[in-house]
């Protein structure tokens, strides 16, 4: 049976989407494709009130701008965009791994972190790590700040996560004094006042693991307040394992878990993704041209399941994943993309056991450097932004 399950544009009312619901099964959710308004590399979040927040990159990938838009519940259109970076045309998105990331914290305040152009810094210092937050009036972003105080080598990995108690966590991988992937570590700068001020960055990953220099990473805070950081290691230059750091004490200590081992004497320029649905954390990553997702145990932080994407196992990249309250999971990724080369957006729905449901969706013509973001709406439908 081939069901109608793809809708281009914005989320439609439930009555306008046809579903076939076998007895004893959850209804098939709608899957909606949402184009970022005039940009690439969207990052999305739906807050507790049902408002959709999005940031995306616009302009030259080596020196462009980040814009933020919001769509309130019940609205079909986004409000007018607000530029995030206070220094125009200085944000970086080249390589796909270097795009901006966003989190929404207490009272719906938006936080954004991104790489800035390295033209005004020494080459060995790499790209600066810039941060800004939406102002109190929600009308503009505050002047950008460089969070790097003593680390160097900003290149491919940064992220930001926030809880609902005013804690904000900015993470990136970099080195201190000694360059090289084997000397890179994940660093954390934390805030306890809604991002108004940050502590000096401290290393939080084991020193022997290193960090893959031009690979992306992802931070996330779950409903219990546990902080997670997913990054790719680079021990001895060849052990590029997908590695999870987890902290239950607001970043003071971390436990380390290997999710996906990979022996590779090269940087794969990969990205990672974390989300929460149905009271479980879900991670997504890439290995050897194929993308995976898996649910994690809340006590041990170990994988309790691993699901591989169907289809071509040679050029899948940049996965994004979300789960709804029924336990259904949607993963989206790219295929055929390369350096300065676009590809296709691909997605697949899975049932709670990890079994694919329906046909794999595909949309050709993805712009260069673009990648998807996935979230669920309040009705349990999925939205893929690209």
Image (cartoon, grey):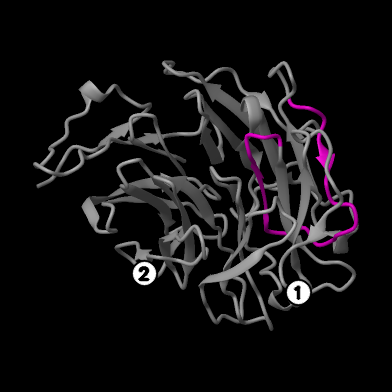
Residue carrying label 2: 313
Q: Residue at x 64, y 33 (%)?
A: 105
Foreground of the two, 366 or 1: 1
The span picked out in magenta is 141-166
- Of helix, strand and loop, which one carries label 2? loop
Structural distance between the alpha carbons of marks 1 and 2 = 32 Å
Q: On screen, 293 above or below 163?
A: below
Residue 95 figure quarter: bottom right
Left or right: 29 with respect to 123? left
The quarter of the displayed image where residue 84 is located:
top right
- Apparent side of residue 92 relative to residue 20 in the rendered image (left or right): right
Q: Position of residue 163 (x, y in %)?
A: 63, 39
Q: Say the numbered circle drawn on residue 207.
A: 1
Q: Residues within 10 Å of mark 1 (few under 14, many from 20)?
A: some
- x and y, in percent, of residue 154 in the image: 77, 58
Q: Residue at x 13, y 45 (%)?
A: 2
Residue in view at x 20 percent, y 41 percent: 26
Could you tell me which secondary element the residue under label 1 belongs to?
helix
In this rendering, would 128 be left or right of 352?
Answer: right
In percent of width and height, residue 274 lies at 52, 52
Q: Is residue 96 visible?
A: yes
Q: Is residue 360 above or below residue 205?
A: above
Q: Is residue 52 left or right of residue 255?
A: left
Residue closest to the eye, 322 or 298: 298
């Amino acid at each position: 049976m081939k069901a109608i399950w793809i809708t281009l544009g914005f989320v439609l009312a439930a009555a306008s989407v046809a579903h076939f619901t076998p007895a004893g099964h959850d209804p098939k959710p709608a899957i909606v494709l949402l184009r970022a308004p005039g940009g690439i590399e969207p990052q999305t979040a739906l807050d507790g009130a049902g408002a959709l927040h999005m940031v995306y990159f616009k302009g030259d990938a080596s020196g462009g701008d980040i814009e933020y838009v919001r769509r309130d519940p019940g609205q079909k259109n986004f409000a007018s965009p607000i530029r995030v970076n206070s220094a125009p045309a200085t944000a970086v998105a080249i390589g796909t791994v270097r795009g901006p990331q966003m989190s929404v914290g207490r009272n719906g305040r938006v936080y954004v972190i991104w790489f800035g152009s390295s033209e005004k810094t020494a080459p060995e210092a790499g790209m600066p790590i810039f941060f800004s937050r939406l102002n109190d009036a929600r009308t503009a972003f505050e002047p950008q700040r460089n969070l790097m105080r003593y680390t160097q080598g900003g290149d491919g990995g940064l992220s930001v996560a926030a809880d609902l108690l005013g804690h904000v966590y900015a993470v990136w991988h970099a080195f201190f004094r000694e360059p090289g992937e084997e000397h890179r570590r994940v660093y954390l700068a934390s805030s306890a006042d809604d991002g108004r001020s940050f502590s000096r960055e401290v290393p939080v990953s084991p020193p022997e693991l290193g960090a893959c220099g031009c690979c992306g990473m992802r931070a996330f805070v779950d409903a219990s307040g546990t902080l997670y950081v997913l990054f790719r290691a680079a021990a001895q230059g060849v052990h590029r394992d997908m590695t999870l750091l987890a902290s239950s004490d607001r970043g003071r200590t971390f436990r380390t878990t290997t999710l996906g081992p990979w022996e590779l004497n090269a940087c794969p320029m990969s990205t990672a993704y974390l989300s929460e649905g149905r009271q479980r954390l879900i991670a997504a990553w890439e290995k050897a041209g194929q993308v995976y997702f898996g649910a994690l145990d809340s006590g041990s932080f170990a994988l309790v399941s691993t699901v591989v994407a169907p289809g071509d196992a040679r050029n899948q990249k940049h996965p994004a994943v979300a789960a709804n309250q029924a336990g259904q999971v949607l993963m989206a990724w790219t295929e055929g993309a390369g350096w300065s080369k676009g590809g296709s957006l691909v997605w697949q729905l899975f049932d709670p056991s990890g079994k694919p449901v329906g046909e794999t969706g595909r949309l050709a013509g993805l712009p260069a450097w673009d990648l998807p973001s996935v979230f669920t709406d309040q009705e349990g439908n999925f939205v893929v932004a690209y």
